[in-house]
Amino acid sequence: MSITDAVILMAGTGSRLRDSADTIAKPLIPITGRPLISYAIDSFDKAGIKTVHAVVGPNGDALAAAVAPLLPSHMRFRPISNPNWQKQNGVSLLTAAGKVRAPFFLAMGDHLFESSILDQLMAHADLDRLNLAIDRKIDSIFDLDDAMKVQTEDNRIVAIGKKLDNYNAIDTGVFLCPEIMFDYLRRALKDDDCGLADGVRLMAADGNALAIDIGEAWWQDVDTPEMLARAEQEAGRLSRSVQSAGGMTD
């Protein structure tokens, strides 16, 4: 089965990157001269994605207008407004229910990642279950305290959370999701709010959440000025990698 759709969550305000986000929406912050979000678009283009759905928040119209020209002409762009943008990212994803064709890729608007991570997901996924790209290179993680930890047994996720004491992998923020992801997120809602990790936790309890190791591939959350500096160091190599594979959009 071909995967045609991707969802990018970009409804947050980037408060922890405030120095830059005061005037520039976080997905548009330049990394080696290109908007941060353009790297994810390149990777999705290389993976054959036809439609990118972007969940946007309070600056949604302006952000969507700025992101749309970054897509190649053969890729459709569908912004989705999240009126509850101040809630957790599980609520943001729920706004895409009924609008996205499953299975679909899911990524965060403030993450950089190598396109090979999508290749790994497509090669090893069970399309009836949730597939999370995980990084076992724990010693290489920048700001480990802030990372979403994952405990796995073989290829199954058994626990997830930022405060886990026992873990053997890190959540990269890149997923391949089945339609039932939305059902689990609805179950996870408490006071009309939930995080993605809450849904993953419920899916894991039912044996419906798998961990796909990214191997030597690189990714980086861009959530603080320090993370931005780290991303700048690596993004040049990332851009050259995608360009050599013929996936550049500009």
Image (cartoon, grey):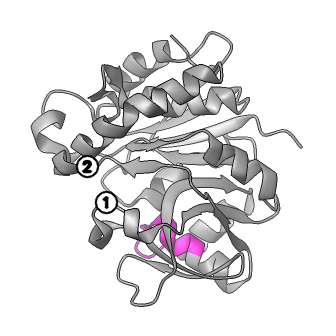
Q: Which residue is mark 1?
A: 142
Q: Position of residue 168 (x, y in %)?
A: 52, 80
134 in magenta: no
Is 195 included in the stretch rendered in magenta?
yes
Instruction: Give the secondary structure at mark 2.
Output: helix
Task: Point out the tag, 1 or 2, that comes first from the N-terminus.
Answer: 1
Q: CA distance from mark 1 to mark 2?
A: 7 Å
Count every numbered label the image shows and give the total.
2
Q: Check the image and report above or below for 98 versus 54.
A: below
What percent of the width, then of the height, locates residue 23?
Answer: 15, 27
Kindly state the secondary structure of the residue where label 1 is placed: loop
Question: Toward which corner of the image does residue 216 lie, by quadrant?
Answer: bottom right
| Label number found at residue 157 | none
Q: Residue 212 sits in which quadrant? A: bottom right
User: What type is the residue that disc 1 sits on?
Assistant: Phe
Residue 200 against residue 90 in the figure, above or below: below
Nearer the observer, 222 or 55:
222
Q: Is residue 166 visible?
A: yes
Residue 65: image quadrant is top left
- Asked whether the beta carbons under mark 1 and mark 2 sit within 8 Å of each other, the answer is yes
> Residues in magenta?
189-200
The quadrant in which the N terminus is found is top right
In this picture, residue 109 sits left or right of residue 250:
left
Q: Which residue is mark 2?
A: 227
